[in-house]
Image (cartoon, grey):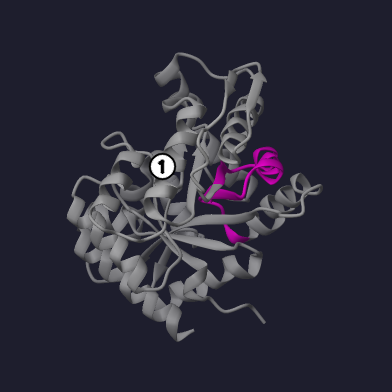
Amino acid sequence: MTRPVHRSDCSVMYPSSPVDPVELKTFASFVELAGMRRLYCGQTMVFEPHTTFSRLLAQGSTTPLGTAVTLMPFRHPVLAALHARELSVFSGSTYVAGLGLGSRQFNEAMTGSWPASPLTYVREYATIVRDLLRGEAVELDGDYFSVRSRLNPDLGQSVELGLGVLRPRMTELAGELADVAISWLTPPEYCAEQLLPSLAKGAVDRDDPPRLATVVNVAVDRPGRDPVQLALAGLGNHLAAPHYGDALTRAGYDIVVGDRDHNAAEIVRRGLYVHGTPAEIATALSAYLAAGVDEILLNVGGVHLSRGPVEALQDLHDISQALEER
């Protein structure tokens, strides 16, 4: 018998670029009222997530926050640690600093290069952030970073380090270094068969193994909605990216790298883009928890971007009610 879904197992992914402060606060308030764990924001090219969350906290929000994920090339790891510490202190709660390397195309566009060893780059970056947030002095002469620094004074911050993962090797590294591994577009069976064993392998020498949090894209079946178009609206760039294509191919999906239309139809057909009645969505979410996923990040991005925030919030409300009924 599968474990039932509880609201404490769910968080909300803010589904768009956080331009409107009132809308952002509305989503944050929904998370609190629904009893969910946290509001997450991803990397955008409109407002930087740290700045966005600082503005939200200045409005009086008390919703726990996190990123899923911000991209490493935008910030030096010492600055990433400073930002995470600030948001934990400002919010008075645990902050999840989810970090990720991003795609090769993105790195080359931002920095002109791609690390010869992405795993080494991420290891060095994450180690610097982790150790600084623990109050330790960092003295690292690495292949990609040379840092001698410490965060003073001790402000009593509570930060969980997150690493974006898609494939086993990076997931194993997250098991070694992170508090939470964060995945996108990873089916429950792929989480169970590839990601969670890799996470456990990386954490074999730890007393506090990390958890797996997974972004799940959802939309309620309503008149006038085409799920393939919703998937394209919310995930077009992901569906064209080679690293997502590789992970989905490993999961047994029929993926054509670069073909957004084909890939959107495939994830709808296979149920990875979760579309149906609220009760059907709640049932689909239970499969992730049964697989061993600790936290589901509900993402109504396709609805938000194609139908607007009111319908997106209505979907979250209806799904929340269905979860409650389970």
Q: Which residue occupies 55% across, 56% down?
A: 213
136 displayed left or right of 326: right
- In which quadrant of the rendered view does residue 286 lie? bottom right
Question: Is 171 included in the stretch rendered in magenta?
Answer: yes
Residue 302 vs residue 109, the one in the foreground: 109
Q: Position of residue 13 (x, y in %)?
A: 39, 55
Residue 282 vs residue 36, the one in the foreground: 36
Q: Position of residue 67 (x, y in %)?
A: 44, 46
Q: How many marks?
A: 1
Residue picked out by circle 1: 86
Question: Is 279 included in the stretch rendered in magenta?
Answer: no
Q: Position of residue 253 (x, y in %)?
A: 57, 50
**Residue furthest out toward the right:** 205
Task: Give the quadrant of the N terminus.
Answer: bottom right
Question: Does residue 91 show up?
Answer: yes
Q: Which residues are magenta?
A: 161-188
